[in-house]
Amino acid sequence: MGGRGRSSSGGGNTDDPRDQGGSSSDSLRKKIDGADSEEEKTQIIVDWIEENESPETETIINPVTGNEYECYSVTIDGIKIYYQTPNDAVFAAIKSLISGNKIPDMLKEHIDAIMIISDQNPGDPKTIAGYEDGIITIFEDRIVDAGILGHEASHGLAEDKWGNAL
């Protein structure tokens, strides 16, 4: 897959989010699975982000809002996660992405990036998340679970299979 996400960095270069390499979720998943509490799981993710976060922000154009955002990022299993500040929404997205293989690999193949933003969806303020151009956007820093990420990724599967993401 890949190549659908739109981002720019510095001098206007276009980056494919999946070309960023990044960390495998295996060791992180094992640590999280071994944690005794939700607080411990969150702390493991906080520590992981500190070790793996991009050193500088990138200017990212969100395909749903059309707005530019200065974002930090982490990459896990080839999926880039963009955010303005690490917060509960970022921790929940990471946990949902890697927790217990709840999102099938065939759906993960349709996720180039996940972008967590504080803005509302301009088309529908009630929208929690959306999918466009391979990017799942989580609106208003909302907490999502694997079901929501899987649902949004299924729009990419539908688009590839039938030409329509709806």
Image: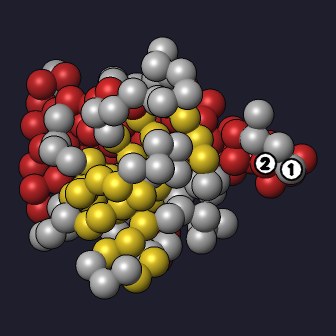
Percent from the top left, x then y, of residue 126? 48, 15
For label 1, the SS is loop
For the image, the number of numbered tags is 2
Percent from the top left, x then y, of residue 67? 39, 50
Q: Quadrant of the C terminus?
A: top right
Which residue occupies 46% across, 19% down? Answer: 125
In-front residue for pair 85/9 = 9
Task: Determine which of the numbered discs, if any, sits on residue 163 in the image.
Answer: 1
Task: Tell me which amino acid carries mark 1.
Answer: Gly
Percent from the top left, x then y, of residue 11? 31, 84
For label 2, the SS is helix
Task: Tell me which amino acid carries mark 2.
Answer: Glu
Which residue occupies 53% across, 62% down? Answer: 5
In-front residue for pair 127/55 = 127
Q: Quadrant of the N terminus?
A: bottom right
Point out the residue furthest to the right here. 162
Which residue occupies 45% across, 77% down? Answer: 14
**2 and 1 marks in contact (CB < 8 Å):** yes
Residue tagged 2: 159
| Residue 123 shows in the view | yes
Which residue occupies 69% across, 39% down? Answer: 154
Q: Quadrant of residue 141?
A: top left
Left or right: 134, with 91 as reference point: right
Gap between marks 2 and 1 measured at Cα: 4 Å
State whether residue 57 is above or below residue 141. below
Q: Quadrant of residue 98?
A: top left
Task: Determine which of the numbered discs, if any, sits on residue 152 in the image.
Answer: none
Left or right: 43, with 79 as reference point: left
